[in-house]
Amino acid sequence: METLHHTPLHAAHNKLGARMVPFAGWDMPVMYSSILDEARAVRNKCGIFDISHMGRLYIEGEDALALLQRTTTNDVGTLGLGKAHYSLIPNPEGGIIDDIIVYRVGPSRFLVVINASNSDKDIDWLKTHASSGVQFNVVTNDTVMIAVQGPDAVDLVARTLKSPEVKEIDRFCFAPLEFAAEGSKFAITACRTGYTGEDGFELIAPADAGERLWGSLMEQGAVPCGLGARDTLRIEAGYPLYGHEIDDFTSPVEALLMWAVSLTKGEFIGRESIVSLKAGKPTRKLMGLKSVQRMQPRQGYTLFSNGEKIGTITSGTFSPVNNLTLAMAYVDSWAAVPGTVVQIQVRDKYVDAEIIPKKAMLQFAR
Amino acid sequence: MATTPEDLKYSKTHEWVRIEGGVVTIGITDHAQAELGDITYLDLPEPGRLLQFDAQFGEIESVKAVSELFSPVSGTVTEINSSIIDHTEVVNEDPFGQGWLIKVELSDSSELAQLMTAEDYVKFAEAGAH
């Protein structure tokens, strides 16, 4: 049996009584006391998540920019220093190998954050396409990554790091900061990003600072949140998760992720396929769904309109703030009309739900 | 640590039974609610429905999973706890009290002998714990 990786916060999770589960080869907290209480904490105040399982690698060297331009969809050429963007690693057929965040750390130095479940696959793929002018430095095991999310998150990070200037960091920008604890000082990176729909930061710190940073954030009032709450929150915000909304066989066209694809930056792997998929109009589209029924739509459940099959659920969750359920589904393009009431087959029952744009989901979760 | 009241009987499918004359109250155990996590949906039978020992009588759903509810007795449903349908969190908060599920008029009280005592249930639940 494969042994599970531990993040530098593993002992802290056990001390907090977390329920641990295997996730993408890591032993991770799914919840501490209640998934829904943790999700509410993020919507109302501030929650913290250990996301150290996500892959982190520096890509640098004279050909680093060219490599990322060729293997990712967004335009790294126009990405400013100190800025980050969401992007995709496409395959030649226009499918999605992974969705990632690219940070421009220097003119020829980038930090790439990738999904834990795709870590090996992504690194192999990028190395396959890299020239000798590119160096890879995987820092996943040397660092912790903590997401601090919620309406109070920015203030809370400012207090924890004793640096009010974090409030000046714009969305999708990052800055080097310092975390001081018990006489030691640690260099950290604070990026104003997240996966919950709320404001906040994702902090990257040296592994040996992890427990102290986690503890300091808790002292300032942050609520520890597990992967369960993280999943609920990202579904409520209409954000895709690899293996649910996107995979090697879904295109950014049907996933409505073309905002992360630059067709003007020049050639990249998969560009031709994406251009032709876009020209041909997608046969299905990723849409949001909202229902007042409590039964949760789950991945694989079928969607009907007037008895005709029109789609498949990719993710769904109970949304605790307003006692609704929110879900995402691939819906046949002709039926993907916001405002339409459709039926989700939940085991032996049919549950009414309204089609809404993904971007409209979050307002119903607050 | 899960609580397990001494005065109740328990099934292997993690329901509890409170015996009060010919009518019993049924719910899920503290151990079961903790395993499920936040309960969000309950599908309970209508009053009047006939239940069979060890047969499915409903469904309970949490954020993470869907589980079937199995009847620890045979008999007729006399009442359901309608106050929890829109407040499913009560089953998490008070599984042996306000979070009860249904009341059943027994048709065969001899079946009660097949249920476990609190002491046996604790051992059973610990052995199955993962």
Image: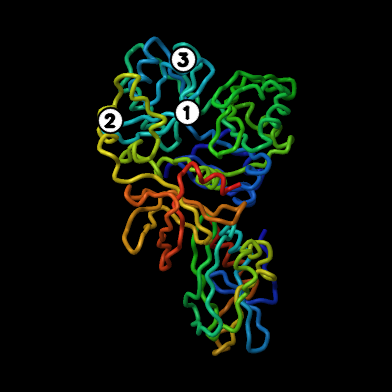
Quadrant of the image occupied by residue A205: top right
Give the residue type at disc 2.
Val
Residue B79 lies, with reference to residue A260, above or below; the image says below
Mark 2 vs 1, N-terminal side: 1
State which chain disc 1 sits on. Answer: A
State which chain disc 3 sits on. Answer: A
Left or right position of A41 against A259? right
Q: Is residue A206 visible?
A: no
Mark 2 vs 3, N-terminal side: 3
Measure the C-alpha gap from mark 3 to mark 1. Answer: 13 Å
Q: Is residue A40 visible?
A: yes
Give the residue type at disc 1.
Val
| Percent of width and height locating residue B43 | 52, 70
Quadrant of the image occupied by residue A151: top right
Which of discs 2 and 3 lies nearer the camera? The answer is 2
* Residue depicted at x 40% and y 35%: A257
- Residue highlighted by disc 3: A109
Of the numbered discs in the image, which one, if any, rests on residue A275? 2
State which chain disc 2 sits on. Answer: A
Q: Residues within 10 Å of mark 3 (few under 14, many from 20)?
A: many
